[in-house]
Amino acid sequence: MATTDDRIRHRDVDLGSRNAVPRRRSPFREERQRKRSRSRSRSPLRRHTSPNKRRPPEDDPLHPITYPRREKEQRLPVEEKTEQPDPVPPAKKKKEDNPLLMRTGGAYIPPARLRMMQEQITDKNSEAYQRIAWEALKKSINGLVNKVNVSNIANIVRELFQENVIRGRGLLGRSIITAQSASPTFTHVYAALVAIVNTKFPQVGELIIKRVIVNFKKGFRRNDKTMCMASANFLAHLCNQQVVHELIALEILTLLLENPTDDSVEVAIGFLKECGLKLSEVAPKGMHGVYDSLRAILNDGKLDVRVQYMIEVMFAIRKDGFKEHPVIISQLDLVEEDDQITHFVTIEEQCDPEDHLNVFKADPDYLANEEKYKQIRDDVLGGHGSSSDSSSGEGSGSEEEEDASEDDEGEMNIQDETQTNTLALRRTIYLTIMSSLSFEECAHKMLQMTIKPGQEYDAASMIIECCSQERSYRKFFGLLGQRFCQLNPEYVEQYVKLFQEHYTTCHRLETNKLRNVAKFYAHLCYSDAIPWTCLAIIHLNEEETTSSSRIFIKILFQELAEYMGLVKLNERLRDPFLAPGFEGLLPRDNPRNTRFSINFFTSIGLGGLTDDLREHLKAASKMIMSQVNDSESSDSTSSSGEDQEEEKRSKHKKEKRKHKRKKSPKEKSKHQKKSSKKSER
């Protein structure tokens, strides 16, 4: 019987040849066969052998395949197989698609449902509540920026400050830049909006400037003429508003005219039209270099005829003095030069646009930061910011009314918390005042309005706000306020209340607004439209006054002296019926406060009003001196006896000293003898 080694050995012999010589097996061939066997065993198509294929005999114990298998079966004990039921896989939990937890905010949610979801959340510091507030903030900022124009920019700014501008500064910057690029004709309006926001929140203005510069660089590198021109025009108007330094404008012009092409020269000319007048005032030498470059480009004649014509038009505009392209139109000149904050940024700097501010991020100190912003908002808006907290971030009222449908059996009292009627009334009053030629016409138009009881405060405050917005005081507003006070006594109470509010918050007013408001109230006092007892709130001393309140009092009394004259004004201040109202203004309780009041009125040129105070101060000083003398005399009488005894003691001591110094003649002779004996020795 042949062994397995013989069988294997016979496989490697070529039986067809006569001279059968055993072949030498190549190691590479063995490796190839091993790989083929592995690939066949692994492939799913060859796991089950075909029925026609011959299997190795199971009874042959020496077969190389069956032998190891049988040996394994002998070694391993046989185990009884018990059928077990297949384990039930655990049910997969469905992921709840919460639209609030998605990165972009998810699908559209109606405002009424959004408000209901916000009310159901008890933890206001949770991420869900913050995300709802973030979505409401985004909608509110986008809506306000899209509504802004020349006529309503003041109202839009007040509504914008009601929102958390610091938290949503990324949203505000993106919304303004997107709106400006979509409608370049309103670039001057958006620049004015940025200028106003920059006075209160400089970090927002700096962020917008950096993003505009980044957009300009992108457009310049990608040869995107539309983006480049929109960004350049925005920077030109920001330069006119003094939000950004004029050096960046010269850098942009130098960059565009360094390698002139048709598009770059066109962008440079559009940029120069918007801010050329401002640059000629601020940097005339730099503008001469820019015009020389344009003249050289025109003389070369390498550009298109259309671009050459644009350069000639630019020189004509310069010759006319930029009449059709002013720096700032009068309706948008809303920021004083002293209040504006100018940012110094250059094109070469690496500006970080801070795009992460556009995406929601949970704030662990959300409630504390919201409280801090409320305090800042009250300081900015003068204490009237908390009145519209309920209306911020809730969308439009019409959508809420459509979506919130409730079945009510009885009658329902609807309270308008969005102050829509108040805003409409203020807008109507503003337009009426600005379109009237005389105060009589304006008063007649306003009396025809449907001003409901309780809205007198809004009407009176709107007149004062319009007066404060003027560059200089107009008597028109004083006469208008006087007419309303004479027609309706309710306005008298409202103006007295407003006087107290404006005096306590005068430190929040700008210098120009402070002057206009003080002159307005001076006219009302002169015409007796409001009682003089409203001056009782003024306490003229060093502790209870500030620099702003002293300026307010100074302008008020100087205007009264100009209207009435110093003699009549002095008589009015000496009126015994009004004396209780002037106790804080002309104090007599403390000589220090009296002296401060005298010095104040003397320094503003109204020293004639302080004659009574001077006499009172002299009499008070005499009384004080007499009291001091009396106290000194009483002290001297008590100490006179002690002084006499001390004098006697001192005299006695002096006499003893003199007696010791004087010597008798005998003592002198003895002393001489002793001295002579010493000399002889």
Image (cartoon, rainbow, N blue to C red):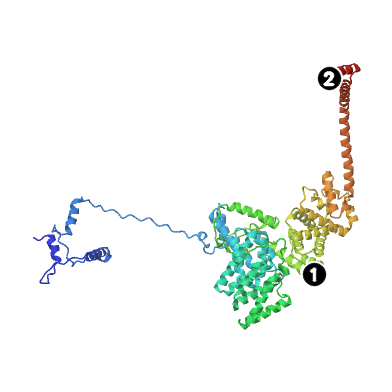
Q: What residue lies at 89% left-to-right and 44% top-to-bottom?
A: 618
Q: Of 383 and 344, which appears nearest the observer?
A: 344
Q: Quadrant of the C terminus?
A: top right
Q: Which mark is residue 437?
A: 1
Count of numbered circles in the view = 2
- Quadrant of the rendering where the N terminus is positioned: bottom left
Q: Distance from label 2 to label 1 (Cα)?
A: 126 Å
Q: For the point 61% across and 74% down, which residue is it?
A: 258
Return the mark for residue 101.
none
In the image, 72: left or right of 642?
left
Residue type at tag 1: Leu
Of label 2 and label 1, which has the lower sequence position?
Answer: 1
Residue plotted at (89% across, 49% down): 611
Could you say whether the residue bearing mark 1 is in a helix, strand or loop?
A: loop
- Of residue 46 and residue 108, the one placed in the foreground of this image is 46
- Provide the residue designation for mark 2: 679
Q: Position of residue 298 (x, y in %)?
A: 65, 80
- Residue 399 found in image quarter: bottom right
Classify 10 Å Cα crowding around label 1: few (below 14), some (14-19), many (20 and above). Answer: few
Q: Nearer the viewer, residue 416 or 671?
A: 671
Examine the image and state in which quarter residue 50 appears: bottom left
Mark 2 Cα within 10 Å, few/some/many (few <14, many 20+)?
A: few
Is residue 250 depicted above or below 624 in this figure?
A: below
Tell me if 127 is positioned left or right of 659 in this view.
Answer: left
- The residue type indicated by label 2 comes to Ser
**Dot 2: what SS?**
helix
Q: Position of residue 524 (x, y in %)?
A: 82, 58
Residue 109 in the image, given as x and y percentages of width and height: 54, 63
